[in-house]
């Protein structure tokens, strides 16, 4: 698998994985199936494994990668504000214990792995 393909797969896994806690937090408790939970765990495991692999590659980051990562941090930094608005508008319809737990560790993984993922994508595009 090439570096660009790995970076794209990681981003795809991230989007799919993030959809699970969002969906589960908006569904009634009785509607969330065991199969959905198992699939969430399997995708989350693949996401973490891929993230660890990318970060452990220790690719050199450039100032450009750091600038791009900071730009992404600024964009994703608005998520807590959006969640605050959702809390005030539809707070009782969201199962926050699922949503916040799911988003918290994914946010940590994103912040930790973003520079390495950008470096991987850049190195792959230079080849």
Image (cartoon, grey):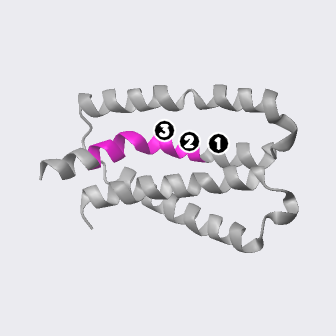
Nearer to me, 116 or 36: 36
Predominant secondary structure in magenta? helix
Residue at label 3? 111
The x and y percentages for residue 54 are 36, 54
Seen at 56% across and 41% down, the residue is 108
Gap in angstroms between the C-alphas marked 2 and 3: 5 Å
Residue at image position (79%, 55%) is: 27
| Mark 2–mark 3 CB contact (< 8 Å) | yes
- The dot on residue 104 is 1
For residue 116: magenta?
yes
Residue that appears at 63% across and 70% down: 39
Q: Is residue 65 above or below residue 23?
A: above
Q: Is residue 52 visible?
A: no
Residue 108 badge: 2
Residue 15 on the magenta segment: no
Circle 2: element type: helix
Left or right: where does residue 112 sit relative to residue 97?
left
Residues at circles 1 and 2 in contact by the CB criterion of under 8 Å: yes
The residues bearing labels 1 and 3 have C-alpha atoms spaced at a distance of: 11 Å
Nearer-the-camera pick, 60 or 38: 38
Magenta segment boundaries in residue numbering? 106-120
Q: Secondary structure at mark 1?
A: helix
User: Does residue 110 sit above or below 11 in this rendering?
Assistant: above
């Amino acid at each position: 698998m090439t570096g660009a393909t790995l970076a794209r797969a990681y981003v795809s896994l991230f989007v799919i994985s993030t959809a699970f806690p969002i969906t589960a937090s908006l569904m009634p408790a009785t509607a969330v199936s065991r199969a959905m939970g198992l699939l969430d765990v399997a995708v989350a495991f693949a996401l973490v494994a891929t993230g660890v692999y990318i970060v452990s590659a220790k690719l050199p980051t450039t100032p450009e990668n750091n600038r791009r990562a900071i730009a992404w941090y600024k964009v994703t930094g608005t998520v807590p504000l959006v969640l605050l608005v959702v809390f005030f508008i539809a707070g009782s319809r969201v199962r926050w214990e699922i949503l916040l737990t799911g988003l918290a560790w994914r946010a940590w993984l994103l912040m930790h792995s973003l520079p390495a993922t950008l470096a991987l994508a850049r190195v792959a595009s230079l080849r």
